Amino acid sequence: MTTNTKTRVNRTVATAKAYPKFAFCSAITPADPEYYARLKTAGIDTASICLHLSGYEHYKFATIHTNLARQANMNTHAFLVTDLTDIYTDVILFSRRFNQLGYTNGEKITIFISPNKRSTDREEKIIEMIDLISNYHDENYIDIALMKRDIDDCIIDLSKLPKLINLTIINCNAQLSGIAEAGTWVYTNDFEGETQLLAYDFYGFYTDEAGYQLSLVDTDYAVQKGDTWHSIARRHGIPLEDLLALNRAEKDDKLFAGQVVRIA
C-alpha cells in the first residue's frame, strides 16, 4: 500500500523596519538649529535642500538651510523648483549654487516640477533639463518630483518621461502615493505643527537604505503603509506578474498595512 504524504512548508514573514524617511527643506522650513535637531531625533537624518526657485536670481535660503543641515550632521542632497517657463536660467542658477555650496557628484539632484499652466511642451522641457544637468552630474543621481494631481489632471503625461532610476510623487495626507512607479512618496506637509515636506524613500535612493534585508527563507511579507504591488515586486526582485499570480491578485487590488502577501 502506498502512503501519500505532503511536505509541509514552514512559511516565514519578512520582518521590515519602517521605510526610511527624509525631509525636503526650503524657505518654509524653520531656520532653527533646534528644529533640525528635532528632525534627527525623529529618525530623519537626510535632507534635500532647495537651492533655486524659478523667478529668483539668488535664493538666500539655500545657504541657510544647507549650513543648518550640515551642522546637524545630516546627509544632504539638493533640489530646484521649476515652473518650466525658463529652464535654461533655472539650470544655470541652480548649478551655480550647487557648486558654490560645495555639493558633490555623489549627492542626488531633484527637479521639482511646479508647472506654469501656460507652459507648453512640458515633458520635452523636463527631459531637456535632465539632459542639461547630466552634462556635469550622473544621470542616475537625478530625480524628478511631480504632484500626483498634475498627473491626474493630465498636466504632466508620465508616459512621455524617461524611466528614471527614481520618481518622487507628492501626494500629501493620502494612504499611498497613488502612482505605481513612485520610488519616493512625499506623504505629509507637517512635522510637529510646522509646514514641512517629509517623504518615504522606498528603495533607498536618497537615504541609501532599502529598509531591510530579505532572508532566503522568507516566504511572506507584511505590507507597510504606502506599498503597492509594483513596489513590493521591485523591492523583492520578483516580476510583477509572478507576484500577482502567487497571490491570485489583480494589479488594481487594494493593499492595506499589515496585510500578509506571498513572495515565494
Image: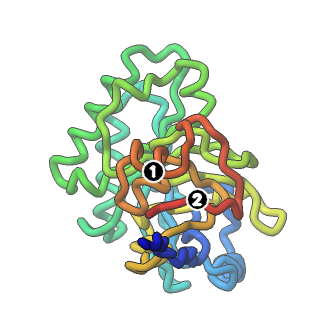
Q: Where is residue 253 in the image (x, y as percent from the top left)?
A: 63, 39
Q: Earlier in the sequence, mark 2 or mark 1?
A: 1
Query: Nearest the camera: 3 or 198?
Result: 3
Does residue 64 appear in the picture of this structure?
Answer: no
- Position in image of residue 242 (x %, y %): 40, 48
Q: Residues within 10 Å of mark 1 (few under 14, many from 20)?
A: many
Please provide percent x and percent y for residue 251. 53, 37
Q: Which residue was labeled with disc 1?
A: 243
Q: Residue drawn 48% across and 80% down?
A: 70
User: Mark 2 and 1 residues: CB-CB less than 8 Å, in contact?
Assistant: yes
**Badge 1 element:** helix
Which amino acid type is shown beneath numbered disc 1? Leu
Q: What's the residue type where badge 2 is placed?
A: Val
Query: Relative to the observer, which residue lies in front, 37 or 157?
Result: 157
Using residue 18 as the reference point, say whether residue 101 is left or right of it.
left
| Residue located 50% across and 54% down the image | 184
Look at the picture and state if 105 lies above or below 243: below
Where does the N terminus fall, quadrant-wise?
Answer: bottom left
- Residue at left offset 42%, top offset 14%: 120
Please say if 76 is above or below 257.
Answer: below
Element on which disc 2 rests: strand
**In the rendered image, the vertical position of residue 53 relative to residue 7, given as above or below:** above
Q: Quadrant of residue 130?
A: top left
Which residue is the site of mark 2? 261
